[in-house]
Image (cartoon, rainbow, N blue to C red):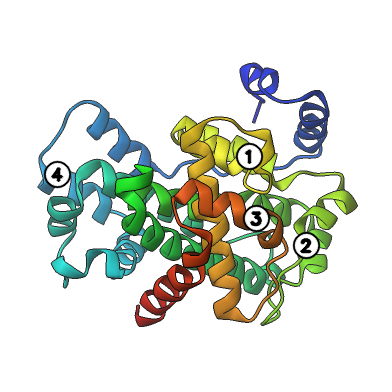
């Protein structure tokens, strides 16, 4: 895949250099599956017949199955159970369902890897990403009147936020080995791993997000999700706050370290409009709702 020159121009010099080197080494940006491109084409052209849209989604049984799993979230509890893709489109909405399908298609399509040895690590990686996405969706639902970030957008960002890791794993077998993602109770310091491989998983993830035509503010949130200070756009900063809190809650639930939390806790609370003294209680509420799922 050739790098979009406009994309390179939007990166800092060091980021552009690293990305060019990685592309020269053969990293592969996962293509959008045909079902997703056809669904996006229909939606963009104004097709609103939910039966036709549902039939397109149903052409991929794997994506359909994961879509049903995604809408089991407490976010949609008032409308459960969902008995058909048509019903999901009617209740969740066409554009919102398309966002869910886009996120699901990435994780479903990137789970194969090269060779069987990577399968457990990739499966564990995407399971974590979907869990973070589910938590992000709960946070967005609760704070939507304050933050104007919707659950489907948060789910999309949650699945995509570390997708650059999966791309690097599929190209560099030692990256997969070093991360030990298939070991229960282990999650690495990705900044250290990026240094080891002269890579930047956030910039690679940004490239994937741009290639998959995610909203610009979601792309920016993926690029800077480890560093609030480099971003001024309010929507992207709010999405980063949702991601940071979702990652922290996932870590609490999994008894894992949360290395970014101490540095970002205050900004997360500010962006989400939560008083510092109320943050712990809010975390408990979201964690309880997630554990009910």
Do the residues under discs 2 and 1 have CB atoms within 8 angstroms?
no
Residue lying farthest right? 196
Q: Quadrant of residue 60?
A: bottom left
Q: Give the residue pinned by disc 3.
A: 166
Q: Give the residue pinned by disc 2.
A: 189
Q: State which tag comes first along the sequence, 1 or 4.
A: 4
Q: State which tag comes first along the sequence, 2 or 1.
A: 2
Give the class, few, some or many, for how many residues have Cα within 10 Å of label 4's Cα (few <14, many ≥20): some
Give the structural element (helix, strand or loop) at label 1: helix
Question: Does the rendering let one see residue 82?
Answer: no
Q: In this image, 6 relative to 78: left or right?
A: right
Give the structural element (helix, strand or loop) at label 3: helix
Q: Give the residue pinned by disc 4.
A: 52
Comparing labels 4 and 2, the label whose residue is closer to the camera: 2
Question: Does the rendering let one see residue 277?
Answer: yes
Q: Quadrant of residue 123?
A: bottom right
Q: CA separation, marks 4 and 3?
A: 33 Å
Q: State which tag comes first along the sequence, 4 or 3.
A: 4
Q: State which tag comes first along the sequence, 3 or 2.
A: 3
Q: CA separation, marks 2 and 1?
A: 17 Å
């Amino acid at each position: 895949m050739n790098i979009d020159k406009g994309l390179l121009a939007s990166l800092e010099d060091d980021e552009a250099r690293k990305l060019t080197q990685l592309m020269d080494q053969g990293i592969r940006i996962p293509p959008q599956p045909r079902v997703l491109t056809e669904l996006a084409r229909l939606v963009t052209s104004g097709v609103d017949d939910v039966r036709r849209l549902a039939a397109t989604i149903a052409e991929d049984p794997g994506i359909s199955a994961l879509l049903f799993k995604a809408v089991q979230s407490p976010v949609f509890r008032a409308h459960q159970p969902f008995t058909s893709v048509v019903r999901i489109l009617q209740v969740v909405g066409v554009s919102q369902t398309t966002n869910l399908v886009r996120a699901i298609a990435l994780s479903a399509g990137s789970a194969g890897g090269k060779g069987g040895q990577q399968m457990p690590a990739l499966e564990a990686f995407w399971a974590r990403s979907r869990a973070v996405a589910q938590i992000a969706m709960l946070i967005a639902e609760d704070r939507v009147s304050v933050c104007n970030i919707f659950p489907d957008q948060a789910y999309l960002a949650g699945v995509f936020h570390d997708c650059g890791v999966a791309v690097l794993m599929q190209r560099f077998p030692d990256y997969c080995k070093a991360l030990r993602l298939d070991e229960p109770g282990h999650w690495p310091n990705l900044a250290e791993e990026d240094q080891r491989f002269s890579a930047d998983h956030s910039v690679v993830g940004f490239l994937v997000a741009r290639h998959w035509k995610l909203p610009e503010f979601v792309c920016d949130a993926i690029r800077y999700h480890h560093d609030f200070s480099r971003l001024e756009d309010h929507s992207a900063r709010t999405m980063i706050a949702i991601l940071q809190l979702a990652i922290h809650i996932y870590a609490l639930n999994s008894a894992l370290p949360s290395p970014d939390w101490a540095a970002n806790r205050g900004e997360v609370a500010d962006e989400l409009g939560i008083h510092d003294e109320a943050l712990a209680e809010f975390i408990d509420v979201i964690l309880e709702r997630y554990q009910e799922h």
